[in-house]
Image (spheres, helix red, strand yellow):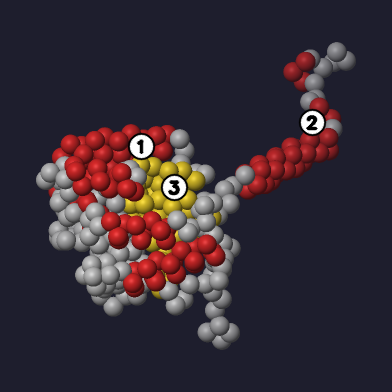
Amino acid sequence: MNGLNRRDEPTVNELYPMKSNIKQWWVAVVTRLTICALLQFSSAFAAEPFFFIQLSDPQFGMFTNNKDFVQETANFEFAVASINRLKPAFVVITGDLVNKPGDRAQIAEFHRIAAKVDPKIRVYNVVGNHDIENVPRPETISVYTNLFGPDHYSFRHGGFVGIVLNSIIIHSPQQTTNHLDDQQKWLRAELERARDGGAQHIVVFQHHPWFLKTADEADQYFNIPRERRDPYLALFREAGVKYLFSGHYHRNALAHDAAIEAVTTGPVGMPQGGDKSGLRVAIVRDDKIEHRYYHFGEIPNRIDLRPQQPSQPKSGS
């Protein structure tokens, strides 16, 4: 061993220090290239942003207390023309499709105009209190489902999961406790399925707002009573729901409870409280949903899906 025992032999790094440095350099380069490739791969497969439109309360007959629905027809026709021009991924109409439950003429006019939506654009109806009465009965729910489809269901668009609820039986369940129990069991299963399936956004649509200003506000006609509001909000938080879209208020309201945003949208029909008739556009991105209410006089020619750039400070400011 030329006077050297095995423990005293110089290492390769000691004999060739440059070779060791080159090896470390190559490891660093390969690591960085791998990271960049993974980021590009992830970006390439990130969901493209899309937008949907929320209409609420077309409520045929409200302007004239059921004498006619001339104004509702004009408003809904304009909304449908705007939908066909803007081409959203889908449309959700959050309740009060008519003003008088079961009125054949009002129902027929709603269907006549709704049928004009481009068939490539899915339309999702949500039941309202004027569709099945303020205190619904099993019979009124059955009439609604025969005319408009299910009163609670879910739908999917890519990683977006929409949960549609019958909020009238949550608000006033006196005669529909069995329906309420069935819907609640179904809701728990749907939320679990959406969460376990890796849904990007789980969004709840219903007619009544859960709350208008704060989650602990007092009960009133326009919100869900706290006796049932609190446990539902806890369920939504557990499932990762961040957006609740509703109508019923005939004006706009935005409120927050921790990570949950409650979005109450003004009417396509008759407005109240100084608001104007219009619709809401919601842009769905990977990490959030941006939305804005447009009254009929300000609907844009197209929806720009590019991320909004932060405003630059003025020179000298």
Question: Which residue is depicted at the point 19% across and 43% down?
Answer: 139
Q: Is residue 175 left or right of residue 78?
A: left
What amino acid is labelled 2 in the image?
A: Asn
Which of the labelled discs sits on residue 190, or is there none?
Answer: 1
Please say if 67 is above or below 124. below
The residue lying toward the viewer, choosing from 98 and 281, is 98
Does the residue at mark 1 contact the one at mark 3 (Cβ under 8 Å)? no
Residue closest to the far right: 2
Q: Secondary structure at mark 1?
A: helix
Label 3 residue SS: strand
Q: Is residue 82 above or below residue 6?
A: below
Give residue 9's position: percent from left, percent from top. Answer: 80, 21
| Alpha carbon distance from label 3 to label 2 | 53 Å
Tag 2, which secondary structure? helix
Q: Which circle's residue, 3 or 2, is located before the other in the chain?
A: 2
Residue at (30%, 64%) from the top-left corner? 60
Q: Is residue 299 visible?
A: yes
Q: Amino acid at mark 3?
A: His
Residue 215, x across and y down, in percent: 23, 57
Q: Which residue is mark 2?
A: 13
